[in-house]
C-alpha cells in the first residue's frame, strides 16, 4: 500500500513535537516511522519538506555562538562544534597564550662547554660548536692527529682521513686529473697517508695540494709507479718501458 504524502508530512510534524525543534535527518531516522529516502524522493529533498512545513531548515552544523578569547578576553563568534577549552580570536592570541604557558625560546640550560645559557633542547652554544668543543675529542678533525683517528688495524684504518679528504675536494670538478674520465673518480693522496708520522694533523695530510682526483684505473697505476704524482696533482702519464 502506497504511503500518502499527507502521512509523511504528519509523521515529520510528530517528530518535531517530540524533539521540540526543527528535526534533522538524524532526528527523523531515530524517531520517524517511514524511510528517509522515501521522503527525499517524494518532496525533492529533506530541506524542501522542512521549508514547506516549518518555513525553515535545521542549521545546527552552521550555528555559531559568541565566546570569549582566552588571551585578550574579547568576544567573537565561533562555530558551536569547534568550541574547545581555550578559544582564541586570532593566531597571534593563541601564540601569546601558549608561549606564556610553555616558553620555547627562553635560554634556560647551561652550555656543556662553557657557562653560557642555551635552549633546553641544545647541548652546546654556537661559540663552543665553532671551537669544536661538541666533538668527541674537543677539537675539530683538522686539528686532530693521525694517531687519534686510527681506531682500526685493517684496511679501513684510514677511513676517517679519506672521508675528510672527500669533503675537502667536494667543490672540485669531479673528473680524473690524468685522463679526464668523469663517470667515477676517487680521492688520491699525492704523499701517502702512511708516509706521515702519527702526530701529524689531519688538516696537514688533507691539504688541497696533497689531494688529487683519479679514476680507478689511474689510481691503480699511481700506486704501482706508472703515474708520477710527486710533482703535484697528476697531469701526465709516465711512459711504460
Image (tube, helix red, strand yellow):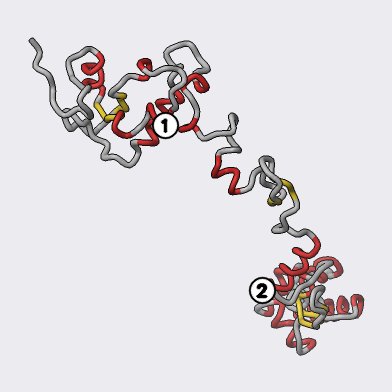
Determine the CA span between mark 2 and mark 1.
Answer: 84 Å
Up the image or down, 81 lies above or below 103; here it is below
In the image, residue 77 lies at what x, y percent? 76, 81
Is 27 displayed left or right of 45 in the figure? right
- Residue lying farthest to the bottom in this orientation: 55
The reply to whether residue 123 is in sight is yes
Up/down of 55 relative to 103, above or below = below
64 versus 155 height, above or below? below
Sequence-earlier tag: 2 or 1: 2
Q: Nearer the viewer, mark 2 or mark 1?
A: 1
- The image quarter containing residue 212 is top left
Q: Quick one: SS at disc 2?
A: helix
Dot 2: within a 10 Å radius of its alpha carbon, few (fewer than 14), some, or many (20 or more) residues?
few
Residue 7 seen from this side: no
User: Foreground: 69 or 197?
Assistant: 197
Residue 138 quadrant: top right
Secondary structure under tag 1 reads helix
Residue that label 1 marks: 203
Say left or right for 187 vs 222: right
User: Could you classify mark 1 by the number of other residues whose Cα lies within 10 Å: few (under 14), some (14-19), or many (20 or more)?
Assistant: some
Q: Is residue 18 left or right of residue 101?
A: right
Nearest to the observer: residue 186 or residue 135: 135
For label 2, the residue is 41
Front-most of residues 174 and 168:
168
Q: Is residue 68 above or below residue 151?
A: below
Disc ID at residue 119: none
Q: Position of residue 113 (x, y in %)?
A: 66, 40
Residues at badges 2 and 1 in contact (C-beta under 8 Å)?
no
Quadrant including the N terminus: bottom right
Residue at 71% of width from left, 80% of height from top? Answer: 47
Rendered residue at 90%/76% (across/down):
19
Residue 17 coordinates in the image, percent (x, y): 90, 80
Amino acid at each position: 500500500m502506497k504511503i500518502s504524502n499527507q502521512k509523511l508530512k504528519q509523521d515529520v510534524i510528530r517528530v518535531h513535537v517530540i524533539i521540540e525543534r526543527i528535526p534533522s535527518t538524524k532526528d527523523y531516522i531515530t524517531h520517524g516511522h517511514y524511510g528517509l529516502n522515501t521522503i527525499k524522493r517524494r518532496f525533492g529533498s529533506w530541506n524542501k519538506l522542512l521549508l514547506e512545513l516549518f518555513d525553515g531548515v535545521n542549521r545546527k552544523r552552521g550555528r555559531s555562538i559568541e565566546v570569549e578569547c582566552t588571551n585578550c578576553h574579547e568576544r567573537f563568534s565561533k562555530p558551536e562544534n569547534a568550541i574547545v577549552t581555550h578559544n582564541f580570536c586570532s593566531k597571534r592570541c593563541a601564540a601569546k597564550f601558549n608561549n606564556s604557558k610553555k616558553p620555547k625560546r627562553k635560554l634556560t640550560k647551561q652550555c656543556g662547554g662553557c657557562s653560557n645559557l642555551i635552549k633546553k633542547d641544545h647541548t652546546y652554544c654556537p661559540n663552543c660548536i665553532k671551537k669544536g668543543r661538541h666533538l668527541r675529542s674537543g677539537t675539530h678533525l683538522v686539528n686532530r692527529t693521525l694517531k687519534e683517528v686510527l681506531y682500526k688495524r685493517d684496511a679501513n684504518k684510514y677511513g676517517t682521513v679519506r672521508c675528510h679528504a672527500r669533503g675537502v675536494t667536494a667543490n672540485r670538478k669531479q673528473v680524473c686529473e690524468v685522463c679526464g674520465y668523469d663517470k667515477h673518480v676517487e680521492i688520491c693522496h699525492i704523499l701517502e697517508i702512511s708516509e706521515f708520522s702519527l702526530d701529524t694533523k689531519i688538516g696537514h695530510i688533507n691539504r688541497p695540494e696533497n689531494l688529487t682526483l683519479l679514476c680507478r684505473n689511474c689510481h691503480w697505476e699511481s700506486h704501482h709507479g706508472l703515474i708520477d704524482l710527486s710533482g703535484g696533482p697528476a697531469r701526465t702519464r709516465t711512459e711504460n718501458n
